[in-house]
Image: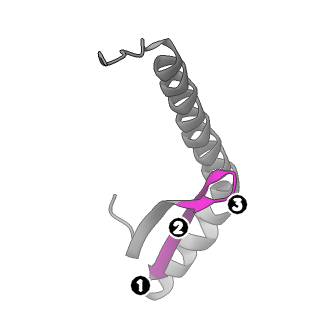
Amino acid sequence: MKVPGEAWLELRAVPDDRGARYEQRAIFFPRGLTGRLYWLAVLPFHGAIFAGMAARITAAAEHHDDAASLDDAASPVSASPL
């Protein structure tokens, strides 16, 4: 996406005592007045956009984790002969 400045999005999963915590951070360094006006124009929407994105990403991760747990539970355990 072309913006008047430098922008990137950091996404990470940080291990914690309950599994992992999802973190995301949008970083924008505006270039000139155009960049500052752009940031002020999009700022009100970022809360809703990034909250929705975080909710979808964590829901997908939890669904994937639940499916993996079910696959592990359904896998037959083979015993080796003595």
Total labels: the figure holds 3
Membership of 17 in magenta stretch: yes
Q: Give the residue drawn at x 64%, y 65%.
A: 43
Q: Give the residue drawn at x 48%, y 60%.
A: 11
How far separated are the C-alphas under marks 3 and 1? 19 Å
Kindly tell me whether residue 61 is visible in this rendering.
yes
State which quadrant residue 31 falls in: bottom left
Q: Amino acid at mark 3?
A: Pro
- Left or right: 1 with respect to 59? left
Q: Give the residue drawn at x 31%, y 19%.
A: 82
How far separated are the C-alphas under marks 1 and 2? 16 Å
Mark 3 vs 2: CB contact within 8 A: no
Residue 81, position in %: x, y? Answer: 29, 15
Residue 24, position in %: x, y? Answer: 56, 61
Q: Would you name the residue on which mark 2 appears?
A: 26
Q: Give the residue drawn at x 59%, y 34%.
A: 62
Camera-nearest residue between 60 and 81: 81
Query: In terms of sequence position, does the residue under pointer 1 or pointer 2 come before the other?
Result: 2
Q: Which residues are magenta?
A: 14-29
Camera-nearest residue between 51 and 14: 14
- Camera-near label (1 vs 2) is 2
Question: Element type at marker 3?
Answer: helix
Crowding at dot 1, Cα within 10 Å, few <14 / some 14-19 / many 20+, comes out as some
Q: Amino acid at mark 2?
A: Ala
Question: Element type at marker 1?
Answer: loop
Q: Residue furthest front?
A: 82
Q: Would you name the residue on which mark 1 appears?
A: 31
Up-down relation of residue 29 to residue 48 (above or below): below
